[in-house]
Amino acid sequence: SDGPAIAALVVAFRKHLQRALPSDEDLSRSAAQLIAAPDAEFYVCTVQRQTVGYVLQRFRHSMWANGMEATIEDLFVHPDARTAGLGRQLVHIALERAREKQCHSVCLDTNENNTASQRIYTSCGFNSFSSRWNGHQMFFRLHLA
């Protein structure tokens, strides 16, 4: 039932990122597909009957985690609803759900210039430092299409 509200927030996120693509229709289709997917869950935040934020979390088996691992794929709170702690609340909901699903770890990525999200994630206990490699983990991507 939250599908249209989630789709609208995903479009708002794309606009916030100053991107033109994917189209509104493509994002709506993708959101609907993820809502129906067994390995993905959306958690939403509603204020005064308005859905103002969401987190998308994915689940998979990881051989390196020796069990289930969750990935926070998206976190977005509409700019008009920020600074009230809603992003942090959404992350806490995602972490609790990962515990319920007996995940061994939760991972995510964010941009090095996105200091607001870094503050949220570090306040929730995330960090990028790997004691095994004595350095910070890095996320790489190669676009194929």
Image (cartoon, grey):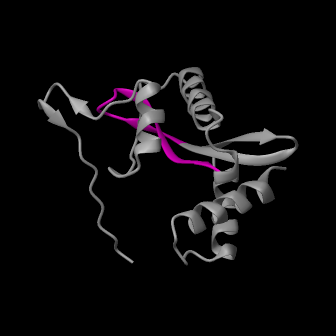
Q: Find the residue positioned furthest to the right.
A: 49
Q: In the rendered structure, does residue 71 fall within the stretch colored magenta?
A: yes
Say which quarter of the image contains residue 107: top left
- For the record, the magenta segment spans 58-77
Name the residue: 59% across, 38% down. 87
Task: Write the residue at 14% across / 26% down.
Answer: 132
Residue 95 figure quarter: top right
Question: Where residue 103 sits in the image (x, y, percent)?
Answer: 47, 26
Q: Residue at x 79, y 59 (%)?
A: 4
Q: Is residue 49 magenta?
A: no
Q: How many marks?
A: 0
State which quarter of the image contains the C terminus.
bottom left
Front-lying residue, 89 or 97: 89
Left or right of 44 on screen, residue 16: left
Q: Is residue 108 above or below residue 7?
A: above
Q: Quadrant of residue 66?
A: top left
Residue at 39% x, 29% y is 126
Residue 97 vs residue 69: left or right?
right
Q: Which percent across, then down, holds residue 142? A: 29, 67
Q: Is residue 66 above or below residue 32?
A: above
Q: Nearer the viewer, residue 65 or 82?
A: 82
In this view of the protein, can residue 73 be seen by the observer?
A: yes
* Main secondary structure type of the part rendered in magenta: strand
Is residue 39 visible in the rendered image? The answer is no
Q: Is residue 23 above or below residue 118?
A: below
Q: Is residue 121 left or right of residue 29?
A: left
